Image (cartoon, rainbow, N blue to C red):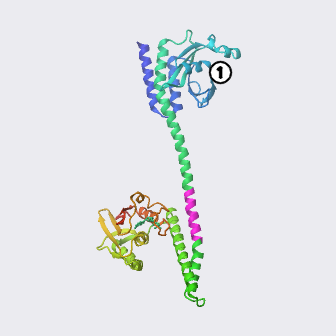
């Protein structure tokens, strides 16, 4: 009874050990030490199946804390191979057992009893406990059943720990890949910023010279020449806009800008933008409904104007002549909500979720870069706000963005 009680204690001890850590080698080494002490034997090792066929790894041993996954070949250990094949425990005498006949011809095996217990997980042998003792008459049936119980309770822990180790390995790899991607992304942004910046200066010079020619500064132009030059200037102005947007986006992406936050009345900011764009609305006879009231918030005026201009330019672009564009502001407790609605062609439902992606454009025949809305999203999110769109095809679109009122 005393012996049975001690067996139970060691079993409980080992079970607790298996849940104490997810570090496989530590857990197994603690188990082998406990078992070797308890059974008073020379050696207790845990041998796990290796990915390489015909091989195993000795991952823990009571008598060698630094065994560190020693690789062994199963043709040199026929007793382990047999247990793996039969899934049954095996007890034998190193000096006399016929299974070791071939090995004995080569080396002088010590006079020891060996017990090999399979560690089975979901009907698959994932390793073995290997016990060596100089006991005459081998291991008792009590010792055998104790070792079987320990092997069973270790199986789960071994599997969990090895899964955990694999996960950790993957996590490390992912973290490294992520750091590399972030760096590449930063390089891409600074490359675009540099390229766009370098393009801007000569483009401005070209535009200025074309304007001068059109104004007749270089001498009178005939009608055909003026027409051709006007077309060239139009395209080159478009190109300047694209370069500006690329520069904007890359600067925002690089995270190297800081917001200039002050208190403003959102209604006034919107009215200022609407007056700036009056000519664009006028060209298409679009009726503009201005917001009313006073809604103050803390934001970067220049950046928020840029958001409004980008959204409103789209409203003008996609609204047919004679339509209507309305802007309103609402106070939503902790944030200001701005809505820009138009009576334009609308946006197909399946495209709405992607509008704010870089370079995403809905097939429309209209010109554009697909960058305007992604710039808006960056700016709004830098303020801690949200931006989204709703639309009914054929009836119009509504763009919303929010800005937290008191975040700064
Ligand atoms: P761009 O206008 O330069 O193409 P944006 O990022 O500003 O790029 O817009 C992305 C796409 O979203 C546009 O190409 C257009 O298809 C769609 N879109 C944006 N605003 C509206 C709107 N008010 N009405 C209809 N479609 C719109």
Q: Specify the segment rendered in magenta.
A: 184-198
Ligand 1 resides in the quarter of the picture at: bottom left
Residue bearing the label numbered 1: 76
Was residue 208 drawn as part of the magenta stretch in this picture? no
Residue 186 included in the magenta stretch of the image: yes
Residue 194 is situated, as x and y percent measured from the top left of the image, at 58, 67
Quadrant the N terminus occupies: top left
Q: Position of residue 367 (x, y in %)?
A: 49, 70
x then y, percent, for residue 13:
44, 25
Q: Magenta stretch: dominant SS?
A: helix
Give whichever of 229, 180 is nearer the camera.
229
Query: In terms of depth relative to the viewer, which is nearer, 311 or 29?
Result: 311
Q: Nearer the viewer, residue 136 or 311?
A: 311
Furthest toward the right, the residue is 106
Residue, x 48% and y 34% (percent of image)? 22
Q: Residue at x 55, y 59 (%)?
A: 186
Location of residue 86 (image quadrant): top right
Is the C terminus in the top left, top right, bottom left or bottom right quadrant?
bottom left
């Amino acid at each position: 009874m005393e012996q049975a009680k001690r067996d139970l204690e060691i079993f409980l001890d080992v079970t607790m050990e298996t849940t104490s850590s997810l570090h496989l080698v530590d857990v197994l080494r603690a188990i082998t030490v406990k078992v070797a002490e308890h059974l008073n034997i020379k050696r207790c090792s845990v041998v796990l199946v290796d990915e390489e066929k015909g091989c195993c790894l000795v991952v823990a041993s009571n008598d060698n804390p630094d065994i560190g996954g020693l690789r062994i070949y199963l043709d040199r250990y026929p007793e382990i191979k047999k247990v793996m094949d039969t899934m049954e425990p095996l007890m034998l005498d190193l000096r006399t057992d016929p299974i070791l006949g071939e090995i004995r011809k080569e080396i002088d095996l010590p006079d020891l009893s060996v017990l090999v217990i399979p560690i089975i997980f979901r009907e698959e042998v994932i390793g073995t406990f290997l016990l060596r003792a100089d006991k005459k008459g081998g291991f008792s049936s009590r010792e055998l059943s104790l070792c079987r119980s320990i092997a069973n309770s270790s199986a789960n822990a071994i599997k969990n720990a090895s899964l955990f180790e694999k996960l950790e390995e993957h996590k490390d790899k992912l973290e490294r890949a992520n750091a590399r991607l972030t760096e590449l992304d930063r390089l891409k942004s600074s490359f675009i910023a540099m390229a766009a910046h370098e393009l801007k200066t000569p483009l401005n010079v070209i535009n200025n010279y074309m304007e001068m020619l059109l104004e007749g500064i270089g001498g009178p132009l005939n009608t055909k020449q003026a027409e051709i030059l006007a077309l060239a200037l139009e395209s080159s102005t478009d190109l300047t806009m694209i370069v500006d947007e690329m520069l904007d986006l890359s600067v925002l992406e690089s995270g190297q800008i800081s917001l200039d936050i002050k208190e403003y009345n959102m209604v006034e900011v919107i009215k200022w933008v609407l007056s700036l764009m009056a000519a664009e609305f006028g060209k298409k006879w679009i009726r503009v409904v201005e917001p009313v009231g006073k809604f103050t918030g803390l934001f970067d005026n220049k950046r928020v104007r840029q958001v409004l201009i980008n959204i409103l330019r789209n409203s003008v672009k996609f609204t047919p002549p004679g339509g209507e564009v309305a802007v309103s502001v609402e106070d939503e407790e902790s944030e200001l909500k701005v809505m820009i609605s138009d009576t334009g062609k609308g946006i197909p439902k399946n495209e709405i979720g992607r509008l704010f992606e870089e370079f995403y454009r809905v097939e429309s025949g209209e010109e554009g870069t697909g960058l305007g809305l992604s710039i808006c999203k960056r700016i709004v999110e830098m303020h801690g706000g949200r931006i989204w769109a709703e639309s009914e095809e054929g009836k119009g679109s509504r763009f919303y963005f929010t800005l937290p009122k008191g975040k700064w």
